């Protein structure tokens, strides 16, 4: 057949470039690809090839997927049978994915379209040509994956060195020379957010307070002239801020934190208090006990090596036991933990509440601790007596949530050691809680000292130190201070002891009515010797039985010891 009688083939040129770099030039990579393809089509004019003027260009699109406007348009025209031949500069311009290539070729075959690469001669109508093309595409896909791995490794290595690798700049920082630089005005807002959260203990209330103060999110201006931000904080934004380790001066990549090249806005102490409060609130929400059993000391309880003790809990036989656990233990840093790794929550809370109540019952000491060199600022003793009495009554009657608010106001921190508990009382917070701040010069606990990295003058605190130690009793730990047993103060009944005493009365009643110990043991699924040992406990002194039921038993008394005790020891336990 002569050249003049050959069927005309409409040829579409497809071009692609992965990045947008250089596309703004008058003659760019896409133009160069198209020029080479057009020249090839011209050379095949004798075969009836004719250039389709429509352009199918994808500038700034990866070859790893098919979500490209130029390719989508090309496939649509092929479906409409407007194209007979697709011409590309290189096969990887069309795709770098074998699976995508299979889909594209299936579309080509379904509509009788041929595929040509200018720099790589392929005939897709033969099995050998298709095999060769698949092998080449395998290398193209491999190259794409290796390039991706190199990029990911580069980003990870850079983050480990604390370098900025893109992303939204957080409130409190500006970006200069590819590095975060503190924005002093925004940093004040960040510190205020963190400090207020520790005081308010609730993101919802924090959101309301920030709105009342007129504090807004970061204003961001884009090259296009568009401006976003400068609006009220949402709860989600606040949760993100409170968990953002960037404010500690760290760079985070895939969950791992590394020292950053930027300066911190928040110090470690404040960060730990915020995280402990967040964890405490999360635990309470999860178990639906936020209103009934808030963790009173969340955020202010530390071990003797500075680790925050975070609220936690366990459940045994339907009974929930609350604890405070060292962050060092939770983060698998046992070597950094203090002497106390885990503390029964109700016991330490009872101790602190008791010491605060004792302080408020001693107005003479309160007046002495709050005394300043300026006599004109010191309230009269009668005023202190009246104020402490009112606060003590309010504190005693307060529900748990309100009690925690008062504790956070007047208590800076509680430190537990192997032999003592130290409670740091914030003088300014105590003055405010007593209502004695009028006419007095104080360093507000909310004030931000830019030069001290949030450290506060220790003269604004005084300490209550109590000799106390943890002692194990069976599976439980009990906090002892002098002769005071704070496990008993918290009225935490021992389920094991109570169950044993109840069994004793039940089995004794059965035994009296003629049921043998063997029969009781068979029904209960225990050894007859155990039944015989438990039944005598039905004759415990009434005072001891009452103490066990109310949780006032001696700290060393366990069910096992009770069974093995003689009557004389029972009487001795009752005398306590």
Image: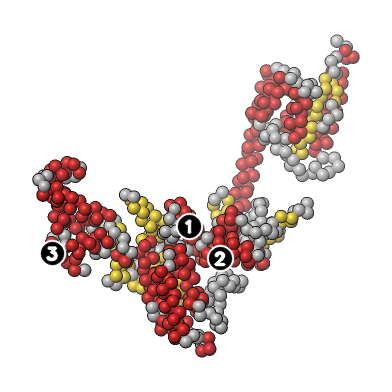
Q: Dot 3: few (<14), some (14–19), or many (≥20) neighbours within 10 Å?
A: few
Residue lying at the far top of the rendered structure? 1
Image quarter for residue 569?
A: bottom left
**Residue 239 percent coordinates (x, y):** 56, 56
Mark 3, residue position: 568
Name the residue nearer the viewer: 145 or 54.
54
Name the residue nearer the viewer: 10 or 311.
311
Mark 1, residue position: 281
Q: From the viewer's perspective, tell me whether residue 148 is left or right of residue 257.
A: right
Q: From the viewer's perspective, tell me whether residue 9 is left or right of residue 96.
A: right
From this viewpoint, is residue 265 visible? no
From this viewpoint, is residue 474 visible? yes
**Residue 352 percent coordinates (x, y):** 39, 69
Q: Dot 1: few (<14), some (14–19), or many (≥20) neighbours within 10 Å?
A: many
| Quarter of the picture holding the C terminus | bottom left
Whether pointer 2 and pointer 1 mark residues with C-beta atoms closer than 8 Å, the reply is no
Name the residue nearer the viewer: 227 or 164.
227
Q: From the viewer's perspective, tell me whether residue 161 is left or right of residue 7.
A: left
Q: Relative to 403, does residue 506 appear above or below in the rendering? A: above
Q: From the viewer's perspective, tell me whether residue 493 is left or right of residue 298.
A: left
Q: Relative to 187, does residue 435 appear above or below in the rendering? A: below
**Residue 294 percent coordinates (x, y):** 44, 60
Tell me what residue is drawn at x 85 percent, y 10 percent.
1
Whether pointer 3 and pointer 2 mark residues with C-beta atoms closer than 8 Å, the reply is no
Disc 1, SS: helix
Q: Earlier in the sequence, mark 3 or mark 1?
A: 1
């Amino acid at each position: 057949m002569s050249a003049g009688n050959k069927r005309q083939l409409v040829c579409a040129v497809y071009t692609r470039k992965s990045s947008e770099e250089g596309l703004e030039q008058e003659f760019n990579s896409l133009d160069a690809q198209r020029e080479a393809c057009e020249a090839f089509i011209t050379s095949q004019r004798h075969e009836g090839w004719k250039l389709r003027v429509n352009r199918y260009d994808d500038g700034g699109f990866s070859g790893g997927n098919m979500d490209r406007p130029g390719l989508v348009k090309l496939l649509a025209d092929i479906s409409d049978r407007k194209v007979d031949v697709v011409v590309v500069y290189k096969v990887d311009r069309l795709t770098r994915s074998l699976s995508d290539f299979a889909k594209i070729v299936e579309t080509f075959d379904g509509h009788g379209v041929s595929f040509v690469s200018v720099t790589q001669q392929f005939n897709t109508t033969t099995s050998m040509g298709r095999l060769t093309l698949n092998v080449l595409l395998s290398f193209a896909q491999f190259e794409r994956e290796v390039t991706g791995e190199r990029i990911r490794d580069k980003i990870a290595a850079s983050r480990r060195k604390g370098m900025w690798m893109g992303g939204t700049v957080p409130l409190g920082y500006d970006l200069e020379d590819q590095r975060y630089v503190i924005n002093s005005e925004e940093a004040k807002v960040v510190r205020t957010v963190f400090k207020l959260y520790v005081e308010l203990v609730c993101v919802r209330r924090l959101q309301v307070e920030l709105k009342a103060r007129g504090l807004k999110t970061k204003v961001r201006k884009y090259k296009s002239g568009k401006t976003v931000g400068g609006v009220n904080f949402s709860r989600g934004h606040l949760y993100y801020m409170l968990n953002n380790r960037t404010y500690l001066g760290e760079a985070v990549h895939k969950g791992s934190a590394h020292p950053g090249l930027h300066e911190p806005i928040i110090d470690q102490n404040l960060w730990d208090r915020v995280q402990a409060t967040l964890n405490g609130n999360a635990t309470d929400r999860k178990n639906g006990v936020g209103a009934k059993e808030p963790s009173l000391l969340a955020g202010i309880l530390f071990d003797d090596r500075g680790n925050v003790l975070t609220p936690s809990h366990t459940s045994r036989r339907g009974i929930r036991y609350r604890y405070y656990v060292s962050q060092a233990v939770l983060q698998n840093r046992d070597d950094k933990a203090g002497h106390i790794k885990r503390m029964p929550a109700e016991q330490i809370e009872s101790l602190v509440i008791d010491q605060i109540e004792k302080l408020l019952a001693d107005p003479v000491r309160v007046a002495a601790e709050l005394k300043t060199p300026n006599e004109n600022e010191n309230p009269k003793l009668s005023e202190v007596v009246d104020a402490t009495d009112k606060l003590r009554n309010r504190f005693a009657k307060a529900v748990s949530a309100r009690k925690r608010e008062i504790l956070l106001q007047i208590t800076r921190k509680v430190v537990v050691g192997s032999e003592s508990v130290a409670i740091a009382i914030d003088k300014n917070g105590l003055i405010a809680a007593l209502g004695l701040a009028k006419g007095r010069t104080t360093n507000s606990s909310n004030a931000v000292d830019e030069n001290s990295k949030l450290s506060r003058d220790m003269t604004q605190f005084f300490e209550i130190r109590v000799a106390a130690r943890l002692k194990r009793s069976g599976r439980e730990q009990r906090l002892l201070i002098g002769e005071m047993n704070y496990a008993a103060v918290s009225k935490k009944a021992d389920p094991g002891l109570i169950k044993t005493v109840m069994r004793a009365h039940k089995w004794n009643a059965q035994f009296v009515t003629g049921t043998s110990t063997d029969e009781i043991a068979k029904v209960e699924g225990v050894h007859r010797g155990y039944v015989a040992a438990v039944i005598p406990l039905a004759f415990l002194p009434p005072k001891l039985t009452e103490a066990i039921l109310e949780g006032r038993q001696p700290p060393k008394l366990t069910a096992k010891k009770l069974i093995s005790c003689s009557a004389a020891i029972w009487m001795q336990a009752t005398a306590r």
